[in-house]
Image (cartoon, rainbow, N blue to C red):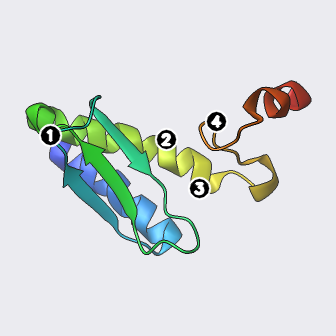
């Protein structure tokens, strides 16, 4: 299996498990390598943004980001949280330990 095939396989798994497509967006202003916003109930698609200068690493970036998304998607709702979403992240983390 090539890197491209492996990347497509995990991307397809995200789409199958959520019923929503994964859109890839090249973004010159993006400060990192890549990130993925998992679609909420009101969003039609997941969005994976990546910096175009890392296009040669795109199969790895897609697989990595989709792997992280799968971990969140497969987690039970009551255990799911997003560290960057909540103002009270520290409190939430303290309550879980």
Left or right? Give the position of 52 relative to 49.
left
In percent of width and height, residue 85 lies at: 63, 44
Give the camera-side residue of 74 and 82. Answer: 82
Q: CA distance from mark 3 to mark 2?
A: 9 Å
Q: Which residue is mark 2?
A: 68
In percent of width and height, residue 55 lies at: 11, 38
Q: Earlier in the sequence, mark 3 or mark 2?
A: 2
Q: Is residue 86 visible?
A: yes
- The N terminus lies in quadrant: top left
Task: Report if the CB atoms under discs 2 and 4 are less than 8 Å apart.
Answer: no
Q: Earlier in the sequence, mark 2 or mark 1?
A: 1
Left or right? Give the position of 74 relative to 78.
left
Q: Residues within 10 Å of mark 2 (few under 14, many from 20)?
A: some
Instruction: Nearest to the eye among marks 2 and 4: give it.
Output: 4
Left or right? Give the position of 69 relative to 84.
left
In percent of width and height, residue 63 lies at: 33, 42
Q: Which mark is residue 73?
A: 3
Q: Which residue is mark 4?
A: 83
Q: Earlier in the sequence, mark 4 or mark 3?
A: 3
Q: Earlier in the sequence, mark 2 or mark 4?
A: 2
Q: Secondary structure at mark 1?
A: loop
Instruction: Nearest to the eye among marks 2 and 1: give it.
Output: 1
Q: Secondary structure at mark 2?
A: helix
Q: CA distance from mark 3 to mark 1?
A: 28 Å
């Amino acid at each position: 299996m090539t890197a491209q095939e492996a990347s497509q396989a995990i991307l397809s798994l995200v789409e199958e498990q959520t019923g929503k497509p994964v859109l890839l967006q090249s973004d010159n202003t993006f400060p990192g390598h890549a990130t993925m916003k998992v679609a909420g109930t009101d969003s039609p698609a997941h969005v994976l943004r990546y910096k175009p200068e890392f296009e040669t690493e795109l199969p790895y970036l897609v697989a990595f980001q989709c792997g992280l998304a799968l971990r969140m998607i497969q987690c039970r709702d009551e255990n799911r949280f997003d560290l960057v979403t909540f103002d009270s992240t520290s409190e939430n983390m303290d309550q879980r330990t």
